[in-house]
Amino acid sequence: MEETQTWRLCDAGAHCELELDWTLRGLRAITFGQYPYGGLFVHMPYRAEVGGTVRTSEGMGFPQAEGQPARWVALCMPLPGRRGKAGVAMLDHPGNPGHPVPWRVDHQLGIAPSRCIGGAWHLREGESTTSCYRLYLSCGATDPQAVEAQWRAFAAT
């Protein structure tokens, strides 16, 4: 398999946007089995004693969000060494295969879009697949309306 990643960073002042175009090309036929993980994974420094929150575009939190499809998933938590909370939302582009994809949301609030949760999928020899994601990084509590506005802007690209 050949993998190509293209990353773009935009500092918008009050927030940052980090975008990934991730292409996989089969050098021979490949089957990706059904697993509860796979792909891009975001994990912040979770500590049980200070907690954190997860929210999906469908209004689910942890643990209900695990394995469920959503346009985006946002996580927010206090970080060591800083006052207040920090958040990251991962947005799944509507042009991605299987959109909206099911998400891995683990017990430490790590998040990942994962086509493998929904079942095995195949990449034929010479075939390529590209998935595009945006990470929306912000300070403060998660604002679902702001995340949804980010998703709409990203979806229009």
Image: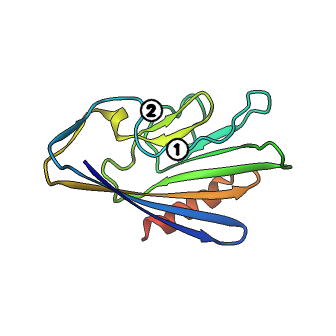
Q: Position of residue 136 (x, y in %)?
A: 60, 58
Q: Position of residue 115 (x, y in %)?
A: 35, 41
What residue is shown with label 1? 58
- Choose between 3 and 20: the one closer to the eye: 3
Name the kind of residue labelled 2 in the image.
Answer: Gly
* Residue shown at the point (15%, 42%) measured from the top left: 29
Q: Alpha-carbon distance for marks 1 and 2?
A: 13 Å
Disc 1 vs disc 2: which is toward the camera? Answer: 2
Q: Position of residue 21 (x, y in %)?
A: 40, 61
Residue 127 as seen in the image, left or right of residue 2: left
Number of residues whose C-alpha sits closer than 10 Å to that of mark 2, classed few (under 14), some (14–19) or many (20 or more): many
The C terminus lies in which quarter of the figure? bottom left
Q: Position of residue 82 (x, y in %)?
A: 83, 49
* Residue shown at the point (42%, 33%) measured from the top left: 37
- Choose between 73 and 77: the one closer to the eye: 77
Dot 1 or dot 2, earlier in sequence = 1
* Residue shown at the point (72%, 67%) measured from the top left: 14
Name the kind of residue labelled 1 in the image.
Answer: Glu
* Residue shown at the point (40%, 38%) measured from the top left: 38
Q: How many numbered circles are shown?
A: 2
What residue is shown with label 2? 67
Residue 123 is drawn in which quadrant?
top left
Residue 98, compared with residue 34, is above or below; it is below
